[in-house]
Image: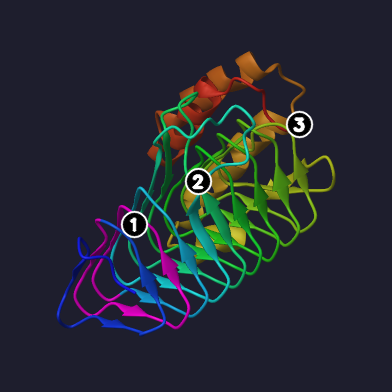
Amino acid sequence: MIDSTAKIDSSAVVHETAIIGRNVVVGPGVEVGPYTLIGDNVEIGAGTKIMSHVVLKGPTKMGCRNIVYQFASIGEDCQDKKYAGEETSLEIGDDNVFREHCSVHRGTVQDQGLTKIGSRNLFMINSHVAHDCVIGNDCIFANNATLAGHVHIGNYVIFGGLTAIHQHGRVGDHAFIAGCAGLNKDCPPFVMAADHYAKPVGINSEGLKRRGFSSQQIESIRHAYKILYRQNLSLEDARKEISKLAEQEPCLLVMVDFLNATQRGIIR
């Protein structure tokens, strides 16, 4: 069933059992599988594939070439008990993959009213993105990874299976969070974290090599890590020392900015 207000591109393929709500926009080359529900005010970009038995609600704007596997729930009302039906939204970039049973909730008016996901992220089976989360690009969330509300995740972050992060937590670019870890404080860029509660265990050197960081840059990042975690400095003193180091190695500026912005404190 397709509502009369929906705009379906002529090249899109929508299964006859799918339900399409009001003011839905389905772009060129989109595929919508059997028994999928696309609620009101959803926009789906070109080349996206929505498999069978998916629930996609709005207001949601999804970019191009995303893939959503069966039984995923994208854009549903949040689980915050303060939510009273206000109109909030979800924005998703391009080339993301949402595997089976993923859940992504829209924002709340207590924050910016927006949950936002960048591009080229992989959300494995049963991973959860709560209300008001902001996720960058090129991240991987393994099976059952769980983000609480208002969490901010940078770029190239990897979450192991069964990993969780507390609400309002932050994880910086290129961080690696090991499986079954629990984050109750911020994890700075480049850092590998493990255990429950998570503790720093080194830098993500292998990931940095794969992404083209030079040996000199990786050594500078390792030096910054030692300043932060091995010299028994206060966070304020460590920030000052890393800021000096960043004057010679600009790749550390992302760490300086992250440390300047932390409010919950960092894992130590």
Give the quadrant of residue 246.
top left
Q: Which residue does the numbered mark 1 point to in the structure image? A: 93
Q: Earlier in the sequence, mark 3 or mark 1?
A: 1
Instruction: Report the label total.
Output: 3
Q: Earlier in the sequence, mark 2 or mark 1?
A: 1
Front one among 161 and 51: 51
Quadrant placement of the N terminus? bottom left
Give the quadrant of residue 230.
top right
Q: Which mark is residue 173?
A: 2
Give how far apart the Cα atoms at labels 3 and 1 are.
Answer: 33 Å
Q: Amino acid at mark 3?
A: Arg
| Residue numbers of the magenta segment | 23-47
Q: Is residue 201 left or right of residue 23?
A: right
Mark 2 touching mark 3, by CB under 8 A? no
Q: Amino acid at mark 1?
A: Gly
Q: Amino acid at mark 2?
A: Asp
In percent of width and height, residue 2 lies at: 29, 71
Q: Is residue 217 magenta?
A: no
In percent of width and height, residue 238 lies at: 62, 21
